[in-house]
Amino acid sequence: MDAVFKALADPNRRALLDQLHLQNGQTLNQLCRHLRMTRQGITKHLGLLIKADLVVPLWRGREKLHYLNPAPLKQISERWIDKHKAACLRALTDLTKGLDALKTEPN
Amino acid sequence: MDAVFKALADPNRRALLDQLHLQNGQTLNQLCRHLRMTRQGITKHLGLLIKADLVVPLWRGREKLHYLNPAPLKQISERWIDKHKAACLRALTDLTKGLDALKTEPN
DNA sequence: CGAATACGCAACCAAACGGTTGCATATTTG
DNA sequence: CAAATATGCAACCGTTTGGTTGCGTATTCG
C-alpha cells in the first residue's frame, strides 16, 4: 500500500494514469507524446506505477502496452480514505470545540 | 492537491493522521510519544500535513493542538479516486481484451 | 539481409527528503 | 524572578528521487 501512495505522490505519474484513463493500453512511445520528458524518464515513472500494481504491462511483439489496474486505488479508498472521511463530522466538531475553548478561556 | 498526495506519501505522516484519528487535538509532545523520532523531525512532518491542510494547528498558551481536517481527503476522493474507480469495469475488460488479442494473435 | 523502430539498462547528476543536533523563544509554574 | 515546559528555527548530512545521456538488444519492415 505504501508503494501506491508513493506512486501517486508525483504529478507526472498521476498524469500518466490520467492519460491511460483517457485511452487504455497505450504503448510507451504513445505515452511519451503527452509528457515532455525523455522516454527513459517516463520508463522510470511507469516502473513505479507497475511496481505499485496500478499499471499492468503487456508485451505485444516489440511494443509494450500499458493497462490500468484500478484495484489498488479501490483498496486505499476503502481501507484508508473512507475510514478518515467517516470521521469528518467528528473532526469538525472537535475543531470547533477547540476554537470555542479558546474563546471562553482567554487566559 | 499535489501537497495532499505528497503529504500522504510518507508512512510516518499517515501514522500521525491515524494517531490524531484516534484522539483529535493532540499537542506536539503527545504525538511524539507514539513515534520514535525527535520532536523536530515530527515538527517537519506536521508542517507538511498542515501545509496540505490535512491538519489544523491551534495554539492554546504554549501548547499547539493539532486537529484533523478531513476536507482535503474528501476532495481527492471525489475528484480523483472515484473517477478512476468508476472506470474499474472498463479497465478490466480492456485488459482481458488485450490478453485475448495476444492469444488469438500469436505471430 | 540491413535499416528502422520500440524498448531496456546503467551511469551520472542536481535537487528534494527524512532525520538529526544545537540553540533560541515563549509560556507556565513555584 | 527563576526554573521548567512546549515549541520554533537553522544548519547539516546521508539517502532517495527525478531526470538526463549513452549505449545495447529485440522486433519489424523494405
Image (spheres, coloured by chain):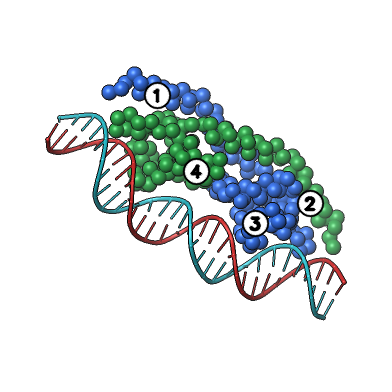
Chain colours: A blue, B green, C cyan, D red
Q: Amino acid at mark 3?
A: Arg
What's the mark number on residue B98?
Answer: 2
Q: Position of residue A80 (x, y in %)?
A: 55, 37
Residue, disc 3 = A36
Location of residue B60 with respect to B4 vertically, above or below: above
Residue sitting farthest toward the top: A104
Location of residue D25 with respect to B38 vertically, above or below: below
Residue nearer the viewer, A53 or B44: B44
Whether residue A57 appears in this view of the structure is no
Q: Amino acid at mark 4?
A: Ala
Instruction: Determine if marks 2 and 3 fall on one subunit.
Output: no
Q: Earlier in the sequence, mark 3 or mark 1?
A: 3
Proximity of marks 2 and 1: CB atoms separated by less than 8 Å: no
Cα separation between marks 2 and 3: 27 Å
Residue D29 location, quadrant:
bottom right
Whether residue B40 appears in this view of the structure is yes
Proximity of marks 4 and 3: CB atoms separated by less than 8 Å: no
Instruction: Determine if marks 4 and 3 fall on one subunit.
Output: no
